[in-house]
């Protein structure tokens, strides 16, 4: 059986990371959440009062992001040795991440690290530009999507479960706003790779989705 690279792209809040984790578990592969890396850069910028592009670019050599597996099997993002997993998941950091992610030097800085992580294959990576820029030769590419309303409801439920008190209309506006920014930016805009399989999970259960994706994976490793 071949070891392959699985590239998963798609809109914000469409469940990419759920799919990626399910598949990584099934395949026994490493999972990399590239959104967490953009979020970590955003958090660093917020904590150090870096407002301009120039300030953020010159701070890049001081930013070290690694992923650590915890005892319960989940993965935590470490920023300069500090566990920032919970802190990078807020709406505020998400918004800031979508402002720092269009910066070309930020993307170069993170893309190089992502490519190095895939050197030995056996990896499932999710993001916005994985199948188009990071691993254009990935053996399996998925483009995951769901309607904005379904995605907003999921994000709302996630934030509520974490003890935040969001307003659904704000979350929906945020989803639409982020979609627009992700698809219209100049640097590596979110788009579907020509050879990606589209997975619209608006009306799929997790189980149906998992079954469908595992089958695609099994076909590709033969
Ligand atoms: O998937 P997420 O919401 O955690 O991503 C946070 C932000 O980072 C989002 O605005 C898109 C951006 N991002 C990106 O530009 N490229 C990636 N490969 C991953 C995320």
Image (cartoon, rainbow, N blue to C red):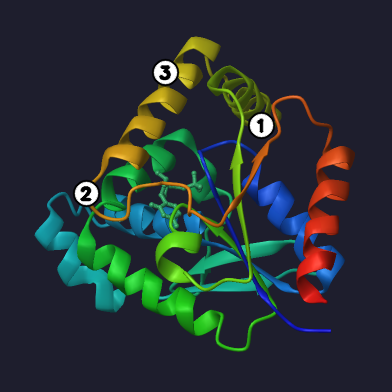
**Label 1, on which residue?**
158
Question: Which residue is the extreme one toward the bottom?
Answer: 120
Please identify the quadrant where the N terminus is shown. bottom right
Q: Are marks 3 and 2 in contact (CB under 8 Å)?
A: no
In the image, taking residue 98 as reference, residue 127 lies left or right, namely: right
Indicate the position of residue 193 as horizontal and vertical percent values: 48, 54
Q: CA distance from mark 3 to mark 2?
A: 22 Å
Q: Is mark 1 within 8 Å of ligand 1?
A: no
Mark 3 or mark 2, earlier in chain: 3
**Label 2, on which residue?**
186
Indicate the position of residue 211 as horizontal and vertical percent values: 88, 48
Indicate the position of residue 122 as horizontal and vertical percent values: 70, 79
Please identify the quadrant where the C terminus is shown. bottom right
Mark 2 or mark 1, earlier in chain: 1
In the image, taking residue 70 as reference, residue 43 lies left or right, namely: left
**On screen, 16 above or below 129?**
above
**Residue 45, located in which quarter of the rendered image?**
bottom left
**On screen, 188 above or below 111?**
above
Q: Which mark is residue 173?
A: 3
* Residue 73 is at least partly visible in this image: no
Answer few, some or many: residues within 10 Å of disc 3's Cα (few below 14, many 20 plus, some between 14 and 19).
some
The residue shown at (29%, 76%) is 62
The residue shown at (58%, 49%) is 86
């Amino acid at each position: 059986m071949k070891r392959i690279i699985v590239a998963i792209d798609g809109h914000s809040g469409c469940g990419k990371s759920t799919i990626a984790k399910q598949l990584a578990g099934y395949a026994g592969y490493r999972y990399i959440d590239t959104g967490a890396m953009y979020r970590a850069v955003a958090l660093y910028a917020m904590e150090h009062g870096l407002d301009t592009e120039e300030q953020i670019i010159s701070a890049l050599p001081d930013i070290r992001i690694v992923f650590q597996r915890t005892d319960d099997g989940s993965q935590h993002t470490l920023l300069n040795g500090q566990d920032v997993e919970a802190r990078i998941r807020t709406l505020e950091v998400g918004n800031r991440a979508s402002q720092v992610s269009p910066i070309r030097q930020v993307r170069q800085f993170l893309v190089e690290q992502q490519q190095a992580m895939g050197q030995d294959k056996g990896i499932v990576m999710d993001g916005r530009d994985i199948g188009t820029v990071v691993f254009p030769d990935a053996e399996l590419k998925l483009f995951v999507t769901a309607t904005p309303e379904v995605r907003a409801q999921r994000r709302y439920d996630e934030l509520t479960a974490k003890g935040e008190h969001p307003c659904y209309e704000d979350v929906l506006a945020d989803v639409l706003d982020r979609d627009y920014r992700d698809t219209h930016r100049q640097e590596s805009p979110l788009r579907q790779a020509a050879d990606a399989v589209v997975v619209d999970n608006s009306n799929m259960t997790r189980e149906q989705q998992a079954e469908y994706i595992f089958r695609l994976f099994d076909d590709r490793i033969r």
